[in-house]
Amino acid sequence: MQLDDMRIFVATVDARNFTAAAHRLALSKQFVSRRVMALEETLGVQLLIRNTRKLAVTDLGQEFYERAKRILGEVEDAEQAMSVRRAGLRGLLRVSAPMSFGMTHLSPLVASFLREHGDVRFDMELSDRTVDVIGEGFDMAIRIGTLPDSTLIAQKLVDIRMVACCSPGYLRRRGTPKAPADLARHACLLYGHGGAVSWEFVVDGVVKNVEVNGPLRANNGELIRDAAVAGLGIVRLPDFIVENALKAGQLVPVLEAFLPPAVSVYAVYPQHRQTSLTIRAFVEFLREQLPKKWIA
């Protein structure tokens, strides 16, 4: 079996028409048809049902199509990787990332990436505001949590654990919440922007949103963490922001039986930047390195 025949078959299924597939591939219709027939003979199965108007895909043809797409994608990735090794990466990347995440985890990885690729330059903005990637001219942004609908391409990097916690002194004064609903009677320190805030917990196997309120709201996780250490209330933050305070005993976890679902870290970038080898290489580098630091 030849990879070219696999590519021709995938293009034919995508087009649902020999003529359209031939046009896309800059080949003759007769050649495309012959190669698909040869592929069917090699495999010993019928992949397509032919009629005068359009092609239909058999069940086995659909299974082969999905496997072929994956194989061709892996071949393309391997070719791109070798191309990068030969030519090297170059150019400027403007990247936005959340402040705490950027300082704690992204900073050493950017330095490592630059040591490996000396012709790449970074323009980093660390901020907890949600930037307009396209409007402000960023090549890529790191986002944590549920992504809004947009035209940006999103690549998942890793999952992180959320932790609800507070200081031991707060618990002595206010008592320990036994269930998420008890948070209505507690001071909660809110991480985010204006509007109502709700925290997710798992109750009886179902994810539920619990509305919370309190004396402080900020768009920086470290500020909220420090307020919790000072005994001002309960926080719900990513593990990487509170892990040191938890290890030091400055904070203690609460509601562990109702562990919130993990949230995902994404790299997002505009569609017109998806062919950038530098972006693809940096995203893959982050995907490989971040799990070595923490996994939910």
Image (cartoon, helix red, strand yellow):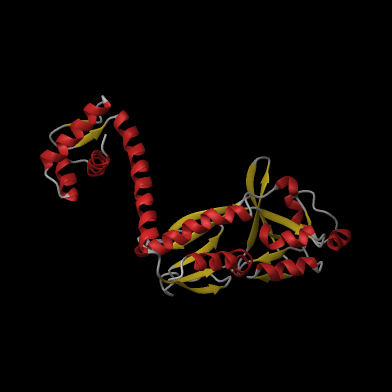
Locate residue 270, reporting x and y percent.
39, 64
Locate residue 220, reporting x and y percent.
65, 70
Give left or right: position of 211 versus 25: right
Give left or right: position of 277 versus 163: left
Give left or right: position of 286 versus 176: left
Locate residue 258, reporting x and y percent.
71, 47
Quadrant in which the N terminus appears = top left
> How many numbered marks are there?
0
Instruction: Looking at the picture, tell me which residue is in the foreground, 164 or 73.
Output: 73
Residue that extends furthest to the front in the rendered view of this protein: 86
Which residue is located at x 63 percent, y 64 percent? 196
Residue 268 in sight in this render: yes
Locate residue 67, reporting x and y percent.
36, 37
Instruction: Looking at the picture, tell me which residue is in the foreground, 47 or 184.
Output: 47
Which residue is located at x 64 percent, y 54 percent? 294
Q: Quadrant of residue 214?
A: bottom right
Above or below, 16 against 190 in this view is above
Residue that extends furthest to the right in the rendered view of this protein: 172
Which residue is located at x 83 percent, y 54 percent? 176
Residue 148 in sight in this render: no
Above or below, 259 against 225 in this view is above
Which residue is located at x 54 percent, y 67 percent? 110
Q: Quadrant of residue 249?
A: bottom right
Q: Quadrant of residue 40?
A: top left
